[in-house]
Amino acid sequence: MAGRREKPRNVGIVPEYVSFSPNGVGTSDERDVRLTLDELETIRLIDFEGLDQRQTAERMGVARATVAAVYARARHAIADALVNGKGITIGGGSVTFAPAAAHGKLWPSKEKESMMRIAVTYENGNVFPHFGRTESFKLYDVEGGKVVSSEVVGTNGVSHGALAGLLAANAVDVLICGGLGGGALAALQQAGVTVYGGTQGPADDVVEAFLAGSLQQTASASCHAHDHEGSCGNGGCCH
């Protein structure tokens, strides 16, 4: 008799940072502690947001006993890394993304599933330069190579790594933005969002350039592809 399939756990964010190491010094993969996405979610909800295990179980869509077991594994893994100087890598696990449970209502739905949805980091008509700090996006729904509708939507306080989950949950196919760090890029790619970074100028114009095929896709982290004074913090990278 085959074993029961593990029920996927609802996860509210795609983590922006997926590896940590002692003093910034890399460790061997064999020694790294692996933290699954559902284990990270229990740490986020219980230790960061301050929920109890019952509330966490409701958010994750599983039994309280399951949360207790996952949380215990996560705490032990983190303790092992801290006490024994091991690196931590994050990924895997039986999960499904459900950022709406943590961050309120979803943005407007596409009129048709076949439409492409583009999101542009947005401020005063222009591409906002810092992906992780943007407070709004302009959404463009595209059909047959033409924009059929557009709307400015807020992030409702969601920032950094959580933005990747928010975009994925709202059926965004393409992100156009200014600067973003390597962690943000990895999180977006993991969420299935194609990224065009290092852009600037009027949002409508960059979308037209994308539709015309003259916008370059981001294949690696781009902190300051645009001309920009000062730094964004985090070593000058815009996460």
Image: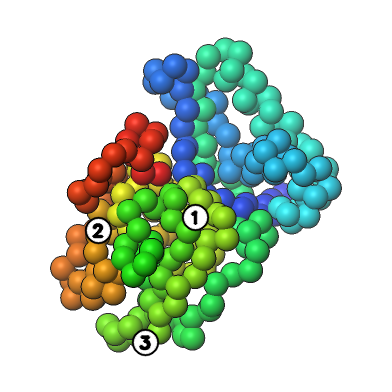
Labels 3 & 1 near each other (Cβ < 8 A):
no
- In x, y percent, where is residue 49? 70, 43
Tell me, what colour scheme is on the image?
rainbow
Q: Quadrant of residue 144?
A: bottom left
Position of the C terminus by quadrant: top left
Give the residue number, with chain letter if any, for mark 1.
Answer: 163
The answer to whether residue 141 of the structure is visible from this angle is: yes
Front position among marks 2 and 1: 2
> For the residue carrying disc 2, how many other residues have a C-alpha within 10 Å: few (<14), some (14-19), or many (20+)?
many
108 versus 190 height, above or below: below
- In x, y percent, where is residue 26? 39, 20
Q: Which mark is residue 220?
A: none
Is label 2 in a helix, a strand or a loop? loop
* Residue located farthest toward the top when viewing the structure as drawn: 84
Residue at the (52%, 18%) spot, across then down:
86
Q: Which mark is residue 148?
A: 3
The answer to whether residue 190 of the structure is visible from this angle is: no
Q: CA distance from mark 3 to mark 1?
A: 24 Å
Q: Quadrant of residue 70?
A: top right
Is label 3 in a helix, a strand or a loop? strand
Is label 1 in a helix, a strand or a loop? helix
Give the residue number, with chain letter if any, for mark 2.
Answer: 199
Q: Amino acid at mark 1?
A: Leu
Front position among marks 3 and 2: 2
- Point out the tag, 3 or 1, that comes first from the N-terminus: 3
- In x, y percent, where is residue 165? 52, 56
Q: Amino acid at mark 3?
A: Val
Q: Nearer the viewer, residue 6 or 209?
A: 209
> For the residue carrying disc 1, how many other residues have a C-alpha within 10 Å: few (<14), some (14-19), or many (20+)?
many
